[in-house]
Image (spheres, rainbow, N blue to C red):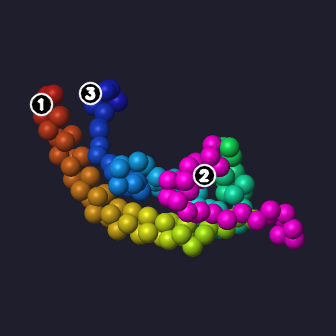
């Protein structure tokens, strides 16, 4: 397929940001928090998503600093050999971001599909 025949498409993203438009987290990080909740450890969640531990840990700390509260709670050693849990606030963030994403996904996916078809049709017409 040549570049002139390549279709382009519209898409959308949802993320959480401050009132000053500082990005906090998007869907990838929401998935990480869900994975932490499911796996019970930060390490396993990071490994299962193919992320880098240091960068992810730094991002968690950055998010917590921006928000002013913890989103995860880590337990070291002991009988549980260490585990990680979402805080109540972390769980609220995950739930709300997931809910808004799925609510919007249906609407925006259809709108993007229609707009993409129209855009490519107009471009083909001009290019012909």
In the picture, the disc for residue 69 is none
Toward which corner of the image does residue 108 lie, by quadrant?
bottom left
Label 3 secondary element: loop
Q: Which residue is mark 1?
A: 126
Residue beneath the point at 60% across and 69% down: 87
The residue positioned farthest toward the right in the image shown: 79
Q: Mark 2 or 1 closer to N-term?
A: 2
Q: Which numbered circle lies on residue 4?
A: 3
Where is residue 48, by image quadrant? bottom right
Q: Residue furthest front?
A: 68
Vertical position of residue 70 compared to residue 126: above or below = below
Query: Depth check: 120 or 80 in front?
Result: 80
Give the Cα separation between the discs numbered 2 and 1. 50 Å
Residue 71 highlighted magenta (yes or no): yes
Please identify the quadrant where the C terminus is shown: top left
Of mark 2 and mark 3, the one earlier in the sequence is 3
- What are the residue bounds of the magenta stretch? 55-82
| Residue 97 vertical placement versus 60 (above, below) | below
Q: Nearer the viewer, residue 22 or 46?
A: 22
Q: Which residue is mark 2?
A: 61
For mark 3, does the 10 Å Cα neighbourhood hold few (<14), some (14 to 19), or many (20 or more) residues?
Answer: few
The residue sitting at 26% across, 52% down in the picture is 112
The reply to whether residue 101 is in sight is yes
Rendered residue at 72%/63% (across/down): 74
The answer to whether residue 50 is visible is no
Count of numbered badges drawn on the protein: 3
| Nearest to viewer (mark 2 / mark 3) | 2
């Amino acid at each position: 397929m040549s570049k002139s025949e390549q279709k382009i498409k519209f898409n959308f993203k949802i993320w959480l940001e401050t009132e000053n438009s500082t990005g906090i987290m998007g869907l990838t990080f929401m998935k990480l928090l869900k994975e932490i909740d499911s796996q019970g450890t930060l390490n396993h969640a990071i490994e299962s998503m193919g992320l880098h531990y240091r960068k992810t840990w730094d991002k968690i700390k950055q998010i917590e600093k921006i928000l002013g509260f913890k989103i995860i709670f880590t337990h070291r050693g002991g009988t549980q050999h260490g585990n990680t849990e979402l805080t109540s606030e972390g769980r609220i963030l995950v739930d709300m971001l997931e809910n808004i994403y799925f609510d919007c996904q249906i609407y925006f996916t259809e709108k993007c599909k229609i707009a993409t078809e129209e855009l490519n049709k107009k471009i083909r017409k001009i290019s012909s």
